[in-house]
Amino acid sequence: MQKKLMATYILIISLTIIIAILFSWQKGDKYIKDTIKKDTEIKVELLSDIINKESKENNFVFQDFVDEYSKKSDIRITIIDRQGQVVADSHEDYKIMDNHAYRQEVSNAINGKMSSEIRYSKTIGANYLYTAMPIYIKNFDGVLRVSLPLIDVQNITIDMIKYVIYGILIGAVIAVIIAYFVTKKFMEPLGELTDAAIKISQGSYNKIYLKNNDETGKLADAFNEMTVKLRLNMWKLEKRNNEFEAVLSSMINGVVAVDEQYKVFISNNKLNHILDINENIMGKKVFEVIRNTTIFNVLEKSIEQNEYIVDETTIKGKDDKIIRVYANPIFASKPSKSRNLGTLLVVQDITDIKKLENVRSDFVSNVTHELNTPLTSIRGFVDTLKNGAIKDEKVANRFLDIIDIESERLSLLIQDILSLSSIENMEKEANISDNKMNEIINEVIDVLNPKISKKGIELKVIVQENITYKCNRNRIKQLIINLMDNAIKYTEKGTITISCEDIDDTIIIKVKDTGIGIDEEYIPRLFERFYRVDKGRSRKMGGTGLGLSIVKHIVGLYNGEIEVKSEVGKGSLFVVRLPKQDGRRCIDIG
Ligand code: ADP
């Protein structure tokens, strides 16, 4: 900046010098020439007077006169007659000189007018000033002309210009030095302001202190005020940005906003997570980073129709994901609401929702199927009885037994469905109280003892004394019944062991049998509704396929966990761990 100012100063000074030189050259030259012209005209007039006087004498000769006065005044004198013929010349031989009638000053003088002319003389090789005036002396009517070389005049002008230049140059140097210090002083506060502005751009908002009271001082004050406002606005902006980022990253759905050129200008991590994107997609064209036809179509349609579009698709991968994509045009809130800024895409992972929907619809069709089987059987036997079988008492009794078994299966199934749905819909366990675990287990054994004895199974009970557990007595009883019942169902003349311990405030219930066991591949599905490893066997045993599903839900209600270890042909072990600590979803009834 200072350099630029200095360069401008120097340019202005140089221009001033050039203009001053040209001006003084022209004016000086003119002034000197005018002065000499006037001087010469006076000389011509004087000479004219002298020639008038002297020509009255008898021995007057023109040549003698011009020679004498040329020497005296150091100028060239010429006398010309009216025809332009030179009759005497102080510097040349007049006899060989050209006719001068057409020289401007001579011609003017012939016409009675004194005049001056500046001309280049080839003979002398310099500019000459010629001044001529008419003379009227006895017997002669002509022109008296005086010539003066202007070489001296030029030299004087050049000298004068030289001094002018010297003066101007000295003045210019002084002006440049002064300009240097003045600009330096002027630039200092500007330099400080510049440094402060650079610091602001780097994020540090320092005040500047200038002592000046002039414009720079006011500028510094305005600058400081601006810094404070800027800092406040930046702080607000940062706060808003942080809030926005926090909201964006807390969203459970993937979000991406694209501008009209399809470039991403907003996105969150959830989007990368849902769509398995491992790069930063900001600023990139959306189709280069998200290669999915449904997303593409939804986006295109929303842009074309300028309205909200939604669609679903499955993303193939290690675990298939089902996503729902919403596209909505983004309209600017300011200044004009109609301005379209791009499109907002929301990507929702609906895999779990879809799974749940599938589970529900599977459940409905399973329930229908499970209910239908005993009902069909009952109706079939009733029809057969009606059609005459009732008359045969033996057959009729057998059919009635079957109808009885199927009705009981139906009733068991309905009971299991009801208890499963009541546990599922339960947010918190109700009716809890302190219960002794050995009492609950003894009650279960009482219920199941007939079945155990009937199958000739040996029962081992290892229950720690005085274990108390805050729970809904019937719910825990049902849990143990279901596990024990399975152990009985799938064990032929073996041993069943039930144990209960309290380790580190966790109730651990183990039900072990030496029955048929379960193949490892089926274990992960055991807790699904209506899942059975061997459908026929389960049915024959009176199983509904809901026992373990109910167990799983009860364990969940108590924030516990269940583990299965099993080996085909050797038996199974079901371990349930129920934490005594709070945190389970229970309502204490005191
Ligand atoms: P079910 O009413 O058929 O017993 P469950 O939900 O109680 O239904 O059990 C699901 C399936 O798990 C059973 O059909 C059976 O194949 C298997 N199962 C459960 N417990 C045992 C066990 N102790 N030994 C062997 N298989 C078992």
Image: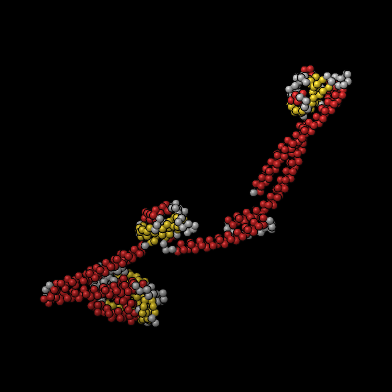
Residue shown at 30% from the left, 76% from the top = 481
Q: Name the quadrant containing residue 550.
A: bottom left
Q: Position of residue 262 (x, y in %)?
A: 43, 53
> Is residue 550 visible to the viewer in this orientation of the structure?
no
Q: Say how many tags the image has.
A: 0
Which part of the image, by quadrant, shows the C terminus? bottom left
Q: Nearer the viewer, residue 150 or 443?
A: 150
Q: Nearer the viewer, residue 258 or 366?
A: 258
> Is residue 188 visible to the viewer in this orientation of the structure?
yes
Residue shown at 31% from the left, 76% from the top = 478
Does 426 sit left or right of 194 as displayed?
Answer: left
Residue shown at 63% from the left, 55% from the top = 193
Q: Residue furthest top?
A: 95
Q: Name the quadrant containing residue 558.
A: bottom left
Q: Is residue 167 above or below residue 252?
A: above
Q: Nearer the viewer, residue 421 or 584?
A: 421
Does 152 sit left or right of 578 as displayed?
Answer: right
User: How is colour applied across the structure in the image?
Assistant: secondary structure
Q: Nearer the viewer, residue 139 or 97?
A: 139
Q: Is residue 21 above or below residue 533?
A: above
Q: Position of residue 192 (x, y in %)?
A: 65, 55
Residue shown at 57% from the left, 58% from the top = 203
Q: Position of residue 3 (x, y in %)?
A: 66, 47
Does 408 sit left or right of 348 as displayed?
Answer: left
Q: Name the quadrant containing residue 374.
A: bottom left
Q: Position of residue 155 (x, y in %)?
A: 77, 32
